[in-house]
Amino acid sequence: MPRLNKRASYLTLLLPAFIIYIGIIIFPILVSFGLSFTEWKRFKMTGFNGLDNYISILTDPVFQRSLWNNVQIMLISVLGQIPLGIILAYLLHRKWVRGTKFFEFMIFLPVTISSVVIALLWNRVFSPVGIYTTFVRMITHNPDYVVKIFESEKFAMIPVLLVLLWQYTSLYMVIFLANLQRIPSSVFEAALIDGAKESTIIWKIVLPALSTVIFTCSVLAISGSLKSFDLVYAMTAGGPVNYTYVMALYLYQHTFTFHNYGKGSAVSIIIVLLSVGLISLVRGIYDKAQKKFE
Amino acid sequence: MKKTALFALVLVLAMTFVSAAGTKEQSSDDGTVTLTAYMQIDPANDQYAGHNAVMAAFEEKYPNIKLDIEYASGEAFHQKFQSMAASKQIPDIYTCYGGARTAYVTETGLTLDLTPYLDDAFKSQFASATWNPQGSAGVIYMIPPAFSVCHTIYANTAILDKLGLEYPKTFDEWLSQIPTIRAAGYYPVSMGNKDPWVVNSWLLGTLIERFGGKEWIMKAAKGEASFTDEPFVKALDVIKQMSDAGLFSPGVNQMSNSEADQEFYQQKSVYLIDAGWRTSAMDAALPADQREAIKMTVFPALDGEVTHNTSSAVASEGFALSKALEKDKAKLDAALTFIKFYTGTEGATIRAEHGDVPSYNLDLSKVNLDVMQKKFVEFSAEYPMGYVFDSIMDGEGVTMLNTDLQAMMMGNGDPKQIAADYEAWVAANDSNRD
């Protein structure tokens, strides 16, 4: 009887959170899933159209480009921001540079600034009337100079990726630094006394100690990359042409500008599926890595 | 401690309820009517100085009508408004367009048809185009307080004089000025097409009308003509020629509107392609001698054009009322009083003094205007106004077209192919062809 009461009280305590979770997470996803099979015209649902929305999205070159751009953002996040975050955190933790507090502050600064402000700042520097462009025009005596990479079909994403790398590496650095500080300094000292090389310390002590947090950061990076919106919207709005389009912009445009809630919902379901799939993949890689370290 | 916290919580809740109830009582007891409003206006922008002055005058004349206004602009305005419309929680008064841009609120049964509330005596005081039918039902959802002129070429005559040039009479003459202008260290034309609607709104519509005449666009929209026809292809080709010849400043597709304006204001370029409403900003930003030297004109003559010296204009967004006001006579009367004040003689006079060209028939010669605003009034009277392309066609197709136009201006597009792609999209999707 007391055990039953305990169970009932657990369920009662969980119920409000469960209802909120169902209401704000599960219910919208289910509604979105249902809407993704509907056709909309003139702000009204005109009926179900099966998989038409999905076929139209997946065969749309603009979506394909958006997906590729999101993949690039994901790669720069997982393979750029996280490793760089670890390196910077390790440098600061081992105090290999002077003024560690100053560098901690300076490196962390970009993540505290709004993405819109960052986008405006970069635009002010590199636009055709920006400081950098004006300076280059002046020293090269070439009044036609503009930063051509922004107009390149292949490379227009690079400035966006660089800004993302600059902006978010610091977030991961702080997370890793906090976790590095949890490793007792005696462990490092003992390793050094035993004659361990720096690479051995990193591979045998640091990375295993950070493995859980690396996994968590990877999940954050993947989900954040797939829903990237604010910086891209403020910096390029997906342009020029559609060169820097991302899936969230595609979703936004179809939902809120073209009022095609069916297509917009289908995009959101694709993003959810991609997130779940990729996070599961990372989970699998993490589990394998854990076994190897064990 | 727990008791204190509980007491504080109860006190806060009680105060909230009391203050909420008090607001409601106030609006009915002392005869004050409070209206909620949502406006796509930026009161901090010089462009809306006239609006601020009208609001102050209205408050003084009608102290018993309070407007609880929320302002927003651009996409943020639309995004929130769409959410309001979807949840059917719209304010009493709001700004909207007569066309497709705000159809989410006008075409969904939320907006009051103003036709029964506007008598002929009131309507006769406005330019006839004010009362063009709006929306698919052809009713009057909103009263446009002004007209938005969407194609203007601003020419710096001081630089032209210095270079021994005049404003070109023909497009070919314009192109032939490029070497002289570039040799003197200036850029020919500033235009900010980073947001790719600019070239469409401020240039394409005028060019199509020049080649096809005023009626052609509706024929093409309805499928009686095709966008693969000559007027459309030729208009695209003119934009391509302008890009290929280097008429625009370098990086035209990376430059925002405000950056293009700055380039022209700093006298780095000779011409600026922009909208008519830029005049109020020029009056605020530029010295008198520079403003005096600016000529406001239209695109030069084109080979094969059927209309001449045209610009393009569209009824500006105006004030509409929530259909729910039908059930509250006091609020409805107050809201109509506001709209009539804003658009009528008092509001129009105040706005004209700040550079608006009101839809209300006003003798603007008697209004004290600043330099550029005076030029704008003269411009509006001198040049015939055609249509604005993207106010007629569906947004999704226009967005696709704008993207293609931007690609073409960057050297990746052919006018005929763009026209064919657009026609295919319109035939399959545009609501004008339903």
Image (spheres, coloured by chain):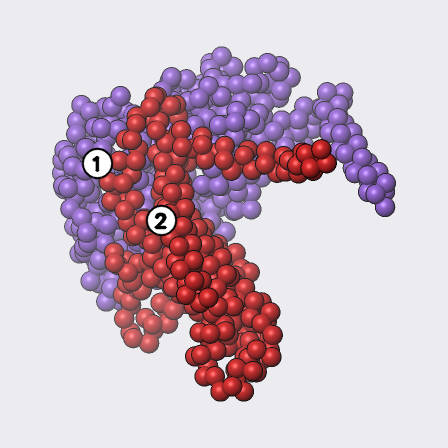
Q: Residue flagged by tag 1: what amino acid is it? A: Tyr
Task: Tell me if A271 is positioned left or right of A148 in this view.
Answer: right
The residue closer to the viewer here, B157 or A93, is A93
Q: Position of residue B373 (x, y in %)?
A: 45, 43
User: Which residue bears the numbered disc 1?
Assistant: B422
Q: Residue flagged by tag 2: what amino acid is it? A: Val
Task: Tell me if B418 is positioned left or right of B275 in this view.
Answer: left
User: Which residue bears the numbered disc 2?
Assistant: A246
Q: Is residue B350 visible?
A: no
**The chain drawn red is chain what?**
A
Residue A122 position (above or below residue B409): below
The answer to whether mark 1 and mark 2 are in CB contact below 8 A is no
User: What residue is rendered at 82% in x and 39% in y?
Assistant: B6
Rate crowding at label 1 as few (under 14), some (14 to 19) or many (20 or more) other CA atoms within 10 Å. many
Q: Which mark is residue B263?
A: none
Q: How many marks?
A: 2
Q: Secondary structure at mark 1?
A: helix
Q: CA distance from mark 1 to mark 2?
A: 23 Å
Q: Is residue B138 visible?
A: yes
Quadrant into which the C terminus of chain B falls: top left
Task: Tell me if B377 is positioned left or right of B249 in this view.
Answer: right
Rate crowding at label 2 as few (under 14), some (14 to 19) or many (20 or more) other CA atoms within 10 Å. many
User: What residue is rendered at 64% in x and 17% in y?
Assistant: B330
Quadrant assignment, res A183: bottom right
**The chain drawn purple is chain what?**
B
1 or 2: mark nearer the eye: 2
